[in-house]
Amino acid sequence: MIAPVNRAADRAAVRAFRPQRTIPAVVVAVLLTLLGLAVAAETISALAGHPLRWIPYDRMLAWATTTPWQSPAFLAIAALVTLVGLALLALAVVPGRPRMVPARTGDADLIIGMRPRSFTRALAHAAEEVPGVHSATARIRGHAVAVTATTSGWDEQHFEAAVRDAVLTRMAALSPVEPYQVQVKLKERR
């Protein structure tokens, strides 16, 4: 039985299984906290009249005032800082690989998901049930499922349509929240 479409339930399932970037977030948070603590300690100690001098301000100021902007050292440091910043932004913006494929239940309080490997195995098994298909594999690539089926090499159009129909039928039964396109590739058995 196919679960009814419920937009609130679909949004809840997608939100629940959204991949998180925990490790990069923890690294950035720890680095920013340590930097903030160092600046706070330097500021408070300088205001108290006994500067800690953990950060060599005098040497940094002297280097900054005597180094021209076209200096290779300055350009290399600026490029490195820019690359690190862009990498951190990319990690934050680009979603990670999902750990679960959310499935439609029709109930916003009931959220279920399938492992991507289990989902693709079920779709490959559906392709293998087509008469004349000896083996099949399936992989998720973005919002598409790529199915590779090994056949005896008869009518290629017949097999492609039959495999696509079998995979789409199984996918409808599994009822994933997000739609997937099915791409079928046939290989001849040797």
Image (cartoon, rainbow, N blue to C red):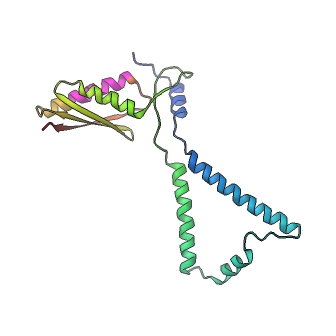
Q: Quadrant of the N terminus?
A: top left
Q: Is residue 125 magenta?
A: no
Determine whether, in the image, residue 57 is placed left or right of residue 116: right
- Image coordinates of residue 16 in percent, x first then y, are 55, 32
Between 19 and 157, the residue placed more toward the observer is 19
Residue that protrudes farthest toward the right in the picture:
48
Determine whether, in the image, residue 4 is placed left or right of residue 168: right
Determine whether, in the image, residue 175 is placed left or right of residue 61: left
Picture residue at 66% right of the left edge, 78% below the top? 64
Q: Quadrant of residue 56?
A: bottom right
- Image coordinates of residue 46 in percent, x first then y, are 84, 69
Q: Quadrant of the C terminus?
A: top left
Picture residue at 54% right of the left edge, 21% below the top? 110
Q: Which residues are magenta?
A: 161-173
Q: Is residue 169 magenta?
A: yes
- Image coordinates of residue 72 in percent, x first then y, are 53, 79
Between 87 and 180, the residue placed more toward the observer is 87
Residue that protrudes farthest toward the top in the picture:
1
